[in-house]
Image (tube, rainbow, N blue to C red):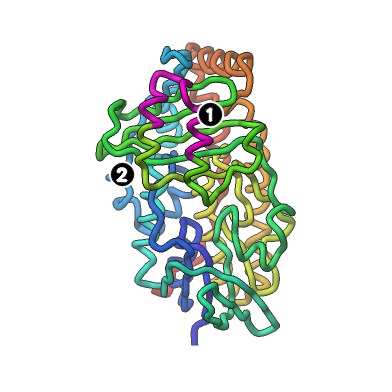
Amino acid sequence: MSERVLISGAGIAGCCLGWWLHKYGYDVTMVEQAPKPRDGGYVIDFWGLGYEVAERMGLLDDLRPHDLKVRDFRILDGKGRRVSGIDQGAIADIMGGRVMSLPRSAIARSLYDAMKDGAAVRFGDSVSDVRQDATGVDVRFESGNSERFDLVFGAGGLHSPVRRLVFGPEAEFETFLGYYAAAFTAPNYGHRDLHAYVAYGVPGRQMWRITLNDDASVFLLVFADARADDVPIHDPVAQRAILRRMYSGMCPEAADMLQALEATTDLYVDRMSQIAMPHWTKGRVALVGDACGCPSLLAGEGSAMAMAEAYTLAGELHAASGDHQRAFAAYERKLQPYVTRKQKAARAFASSFVPKSAAGLWLRNSVLNIVGGLGLSRVLFRGQFNDVLKLSEYGTPLA
């Protein structure tokens, strides 16, 4: 009889883990508090570990139609004048073409579609209590149901309920990086720039826009605000009010962007934080993805790291013939140093990502202009893109 496992969270980490566990013969149940698969989210450069895991899952052909083929990153000032930029083509060259610019939701949907037939997925519910003993884990759900599983995996992101219930309060592990992020999709937005990121920047505020293949645009807003110490993560009315205050008059597109914000149906707002934990596993419970090693979007590799963690966690269980203690120890040993290194790099990058002063903006833009003018973009990016963990081989899946 195959072991029965529960995965809390049907995002990128959870769906990737569910796919691999099912392939290794596990009986997978997944619970997700959202009423349906999540849409929206920002656009990411998909390469390295995530690209390799997707390749091993046979998903690249499914993802390619969503590739935005970005070649340019334009940085504009508050008056709409180009002041700097990045040669995105250098990234593709360094990676030998093994990179795509994808809406995060496209990756999540591809993983969900690949996984859904191999797992029992329950939407609109969440874990409310976890009690484990030597032989299994008793789980109670918000719906009132209770069930017993052999193993439980928390893949619920930055605000993971499993982490809170099993490991302790979120405040024990979260480091706030001083910024907030908002993302949303705007259909038929009037400003279009194909194959390009367009960014407006003023001290403490940044707005990114990218045009999708279906005429919609995705916005990513990042800001620092001492008056927004407690941005509500479940109150879209209050979130919109804060964004109007922060971005009104910020740039020539601000009014159009805020008009699109009012009409959007997929607004996401949250703190930009990291999660650092001494251990990702406890007894028969393991965490994966942002639940245990959130690097923040400053790292630019959150989705890729989540997929690498899911792949490794499932693979180590398979290699250990289901011995979860041995598998969990190997999982932490192989991934924690890499994640810690990426988190450290992201913290160092924070002040350059969204500078809080006019001097900081000038310095960032000047450095990028010098690098671009001297043709050193490939040198600048090579270290980051060569710092990739080598994935282990775990043999052919059972199914």
Image point (68%, 73%), residue name = 325
| Residue at 57% across, 28% down | 353
Is residue 162 shown in magenta? no
Marks 1,2: beta carbons within 8 A: no
Seen in the picture, residue 324 relative to 67 is either above or below; the reply is below
Q: Which residue is mark 2?
A: 66
> Which quadrant of the figure contains the C terminus?
bottom left
The type of residue carrying mark 1 is Met
Q: Is residue 44 above or below residue 378?
A: below
Quote the CA–CA distance across marks 1 and 2: 31 Å
Q: Amino acid at mark 2?
A: His
144 up-or-down from 334: above or below: below
Q: Is residue 247 magenta?
A: yes
Which x, y percent locates residue 79?
A: 44, 13
Task: In the rendered structure, find residue 246 and report the number of the disc placed on it.
Answer: 1
**Residue toward you, 91 or 106:** 106
Quarter-of-image position of residue 197: top left
Query: Which type of secondary structure does the marked residue at label 1 adopt?
Result: helix
Q: Is residue 138 visible?
A: yes
Q: Residue 86 vs residue 160: left or right?
A: left
Q: Which residue is found at the position 38% from the left and 51% from the top?
A: 39
Percent x, y of residue 369: 51, 14
